[in-house]
Image (cartoon, rainbow, N blue to C red):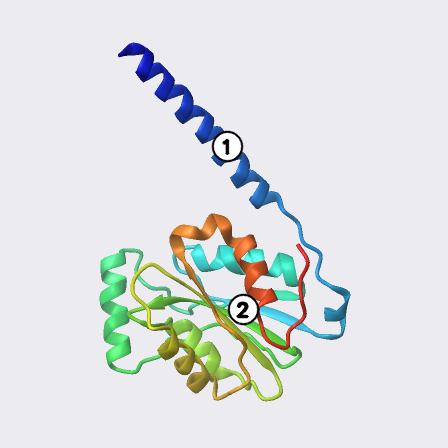
Amino acid sequence: MKFILSTTLIIFCILLIVVIRKFNELKNIKFNPPQVLTDKKILTVYYSNGGHTKEVAQNLHSIVGGDIKEVQLNEKYPNNIFKMSKLVREHMKDDYLPNINDVDISNYDIVFVGSPIWNFSISLPIKTFLKNNNFENKTLIPFFTYSGGVNKKNIINEIKDTANTKDTKKSLFMFENGIFLTKEQLIKWLNNIENFVKFED
């Protein structure tokens, strides 16, 4: 019995070491944006409440280059998740959009926009950002993090309607439990965007 337990413990430790090494390899991977992007001004914009979307945005920025800006609320949501959820549901019901910092996109050609999914919808701060800016002659590329159910088609239509644009590229929906694979998933996503530059990992 002791032999079986010892063997099991050894196997578990070996697997744990392999997983940790793989995680560190993925975490430390560096990518160089292709030269063809140098004539395009790229901006990555995101709102993140729990940190998941922020992590994706930062990894994306490290791949595509350009600038990165965070959407911030002028008046922050409550720290208590239950109070925050209740307030967000009330705001959604009343079609209320919160005030945010000024995030100007006028000098950019390609805008990556990251948002968590709230109650089967894009987050309210990102809605405010989309309504505050003019996406004419710009390429909007959305990405989302979520932990519950999501209707992808509805989300894509919502972001197009809110931004008042049809020029959007293939969206990325990333389940929050898979964040440690962020860069690998991002490369695959970018390579699958139609009429967009190919990235080499």
In the picture of the structure, the residue carrying the numbered disc 1 is 18
Task: Quadrant for the C terminus, please.
Answer: bottom right
Q: Name the residue at 28% across, 77% down.
A: 92
**Picture quarter containing residue 154?**
bottom left
Numbered label tally: 2
Q: Residue 28 carries which label?
A: none
The amino acid at mark 1 is Val
**Picture quarter containing residue 78?**
bottom left
Q: Position of residue 7 (x, y in %)?
A: 37, 17
> Is 37 on the left or on the right of 174, as rendered?
right
Relative to 53, say whether 110 is above or below: below
Q: How far separated are the C-alphas under marks 1 and 2? A: 34 Å
Q: Name the residue at 61% across, 61% down.
A: 61
Q: Earlier in the sequence, mark 1 or mark 2?
A: 1
Within 10 Å of the Cα at label 1, are there few (<14), some (14-19), or many (20+) other Cα atoms?
few
Q: Name the residue at 57% across, 68% down.
A: 192
Residue furthest toward the top?
A: 2
> Is 39 on the left or on the right of 81, as rendered?
right
Relative to 110, say whether 116 is above or below: above
**Which of these two is toward me, 135 or 13?**
13
Q: Where is residue 199 in the image (x, y as percent from the top left)?
A: 67, 62
**Which of these two is toward me, 11 or 162?**
11
**Element type at marker 2?**
strand
In the picture of the structure, the residue carrying the numbered disc 2 is 45
Within 10 Å of the Cα at label 2, are there few (<14), some (14-19), or many (20+) other Cα atoms?
many
Q: Where is residue 115 in the image (x, y as percent from the top left)?
A: 44, 67
